[in-house]
Image (spheres, grey):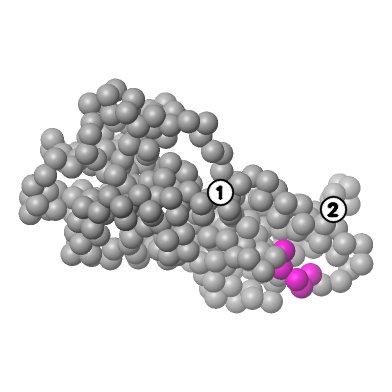
């Protein structure tokens, strides 16, 4: 049956469909690993898996560097493509503020979980509020899987409608991303589409790299840096707005569906030509590197 197809694209190294399926069609396999520095990737069962694909498609340059270094597969052709993102038709910051009775706040979107760095985020934010009393609050959107400190300065809204999420991102002073382990953060891209800058954990190479390339956010590695970055972003409206604009332009330039689709089509055409000529793929899709 595999002879009926030109190639097979496997998404995420961690799933059984990839682990068992890819080796069966390795000569026609493209792997989009969505890999990052996390405990499962160090399991020995994956050592051979990463040597099978005909070609890799990575979401970020940091992911490519990590995978090629860890598994020593720089000899396998690869491209950094990313993913497409839908642009919200409209956002209404004022509507979100009225609906949830909020004004001055920063926002976290995602699973409220220790593995996402939320424990440290709560600790840092409450310490910041104790040292620098103000009206700013931390708003959480997403499923709660850990205990949230009882504080009037932290508000958990749980799951909200998709429109409310975008309205909240638009209304927030900034999006905070405390996770150390991310491949490509969709919510970070969504925040930039809303012209909202970000504050991320600098120990996550991917998030830090996205901030640098987009020139649309700051990053921290300890409390003092968190405090300094938050002070700067909250106090300087002009800088915050400029970063938000940079972020939106970066996403529109690199993550439109048209852009991503064209990248994949180009890759598939190369694979088809390779299968027909049985030659080695060499050239990347383009000279541009996406985050």
- Outermost residue on the top side: it is 99
Residue 271 x %, y %: 81, 60
Upstream in sequence: badge 1 or badge 2: 2
- Does the image show residue 112? no
Report the residue at 57% width, 61% height from top. Answer: 290
Report the residue at 55% width, 75% height from top. Answer: 69
Classify mark 2: helix, strand or loop: loop
Where on the picture, by quarter, is residue 98? top left
Q: Main secondary structure of the magenta part?
A: loop
Query: For residue 6, which numbered disc appears in the image?
Result: 2
Query: Which span of residues is magenta-colored?
Result: 281-285
Left or right: 205 with respect to 152? Answer: right
* Residue at the disc numbered 1: 252
Query: For residue 184, which numbered disc appears in the image?
Result: none
- Any magenta on residue 284? yes
Classify mark 1: helix, strand or loop: helix
Left or right: 80 with respect to 232? Answer: right
Where on the picture, by quarter, is residue 164? top left
Residue 8 x %, y %: 76, 52
């Amino acid at each position: 049956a595999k002879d009926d197809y030109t190639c097979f694209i496997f998404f995420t190294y961690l799933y059984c469909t990839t682990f068992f399926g890819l080796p069966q069609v390795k000569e026609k396999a493209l792997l989009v690993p969505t890999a990052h520095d996390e405990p499962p990737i160090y399991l020995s069962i994956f050592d051979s898996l990463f040597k099978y694909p005909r070609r890799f498609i990575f979401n970020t340059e940091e992911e490519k560097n990590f995978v090629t270094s860890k598994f020593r597969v720089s000899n396998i052709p690869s491209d950094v493509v990313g993913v497409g993102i839908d642009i919200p038709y409209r956002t209404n910051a004022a509507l979100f503020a009225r609906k949830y009775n909020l004004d001055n706040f920063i926002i976290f979107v995602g699973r409220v979980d220790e593995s996402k760095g939320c424990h440290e985020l709560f600790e840092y934010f409450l310490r910041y509020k104790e040292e620098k009393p103000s009206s700013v609050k931390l708003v959480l959107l997403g499923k709660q899987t850990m205990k949230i400190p009882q504080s009037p300065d932290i508000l958990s809204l749980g799951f909200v409608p998709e429109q409310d999420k975008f309205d909240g991102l638009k209304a927030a002073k900034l999006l905070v991303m405390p996770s150390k382990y991310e491949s490509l953060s969709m919510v970070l891209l969504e925040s930039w589409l809303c012209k909202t800058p970000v504050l991320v954990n600098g120990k996550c190479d991917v998030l830090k790299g996205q901030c640098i390339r987009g020139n649309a956010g700051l990053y921290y590695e300890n409390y003092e840096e968190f405090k300094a970055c938050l002070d700067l972003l909250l106090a300087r409206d002009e800088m915050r707005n400029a970063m938000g604009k940079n972020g939106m332009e970066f996403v529109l330039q690199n993550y439109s569906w048209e852009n991503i689709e064209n990248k994949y089509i180009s890759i598939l055409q190369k694979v088809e030509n390779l299968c027909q000529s049985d030659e080695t793929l060499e050239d990347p899709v383009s000279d541009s590197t996406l985050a």
